[in-house]
Image: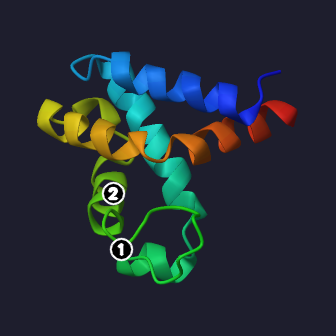
Amino acid sequence: MDTIKERQAKVQQWFDDCDTRHPGVKTALFRAAFMLFDRQTADEQRTDSTRINNNVGFNSADAGYMSWVVKTYFGKPETMYNKTAIKLKFRLRKYSRQIAEIALDNERR
């Protein structure tokens, strides 16, 4: 099993290499955004904001946009515009450690 740093490096490399025009990539980007959205508090999810600076979920600069993406494309991520997918890819890369933590936690279950 990977260490957190090894998995984080793999996640970052995936973001660097992925082609956002591919529907499967759009789905994977959406899933990553959804996993982070799921870590937000119920109040943060409802208000599309971040109030607690705890390095969990979205930061305050990304919360509004990322929440909008999750709510807009829920159930239909493959319909995401390529411009949106590119922006999402760019923003999600900074959350690679959290995404790696979630992936490793899921593998341990």
Q: Which residue is mark 2?
A: 66
* Left or right: 108 in relation to 34: right
Q: Label 2 vs label 1: CA separation? A: 8 Å
Measuring from the top left, give residue 38's x and y in whole percent: 56, 59
Measuring from the top left, give residue 39's x and y in whole percent: 59, 62
Residue depicted at x 47% and y 78%: 44
Amino acid type, residue under disc 2 in the picture? Met
Total number of numbered discs in the rendering: 2
In the image, 77 versus 58, the foreground residue is 58
Q: Which residue is mark 1?
A: 48
Mark 2 falls on what kind of element?
helix
In the image, 64 versus 17, the foreground residue is 17
* Left or right: 93 in relation to 80: right
Mark 1 falls on what kind of element?
loop
Look at the picture and state if 101 lies above or below 24. Answer: below
Q: Residue 64, located in which quarter of the rendered image? A: bottom left
Residue depicted at x 48% and y 41%: 32
Measuring from the top left, give residue 109's x and y in whole percent: 87, 37
Look at the picture and state if 61 lies above or below 92. Answer: below
Residue depicted at x 35% and y 74%: 48
Q: Residue 22, located in which quarter of the rendered image? A: top left
